[in-house]
Amino acid sequence: MTDNMPQETPADLIRKASNGKSVKVPPTTITPEMAKSYLSLGCEEWIDPDDIDEDWIATIEQEMRDGKFPGAIITLSENYKICDDDHRHILMAIARCGVPVGNMILFNIPELRPQLES
């Protein structure tokens, strides 16, 4: 990535996906079963399947068990694949800890591929 290349924020992506119209995303409780289902759909090809941070997952799991996890926005592509490695880790933590967690899920998000140098 180049430093002078503007990065899109989640808000930019939501505006792009909604064609500039107002979008309301209701919170969703993700159960461990739902998390496992999303994980079974896989990730977009730019996410390294072997890059798993077990320490971070354990930290998130503990926050969830303690009721201190603030929630997150989980993005899924048009193919219902996980678009962000952090989101995969959060879903893994939900699946492992066995506690339903409130999050927001954005489905059918258009091209979210990280901007790569050409």
Image: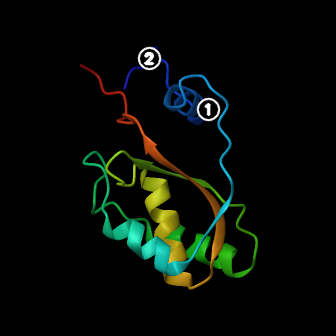
What residue did someone put label 2 on? 5
Q: Give the answer, above or below, for where 10 lies relative to 7.
A: below
Q: Position of residue 4 (x, y in %)?
A: 46, 14
Mark 2 or mark 1: name the one nearer the start of the chain. 2
Q: Give the answer, above or below, for where 24 lies relative to 59.
A: above
* Label 1: element kind: helix
What residue did someone put label 1 on? 11
Relative to 39, is 118 on the left or the right?
A: left
- Looking at the picture, tell me which residue is in the foreground, 88 or 53: 88
Relative to 58, is 70 on the left or the right?
A: right
- Looking at the picture, tell me which residue is in the foreground, 3 or 11: 11
- Label 1 sits on what residue type? Ala
- Looking at the picture, tell me which residue is in the foreground, 103 or 50: 103
- Residue count near mark 1 (Cα–Cα under 10 Å), binned few <14, some 14–19, many ≥20: few
Q: Are marks 2 and 1 in contact (CB under 8 Å)?
A: no
Residue at the extreme bottom of the image, as rendered: 98
- Looking at the picture, tell me which residue is in the foreground, 82 or 53: 82
Relative to 111, is 28 on the left or the right?
A: right
Give the quadrant of residue 65.
bottom right
Residue at 64%, 61% in the rendered image: 103
Give the quadrant of residue 3.
top left
Residue at 30%, 61% in the rendered image: 42
Q: Position of residue 50 (x, y in %)?
A: 27, 63
Relative to 117, is 94 on the left or the right?
A: right
Residue at 36%, 34% in the rendered image: 111
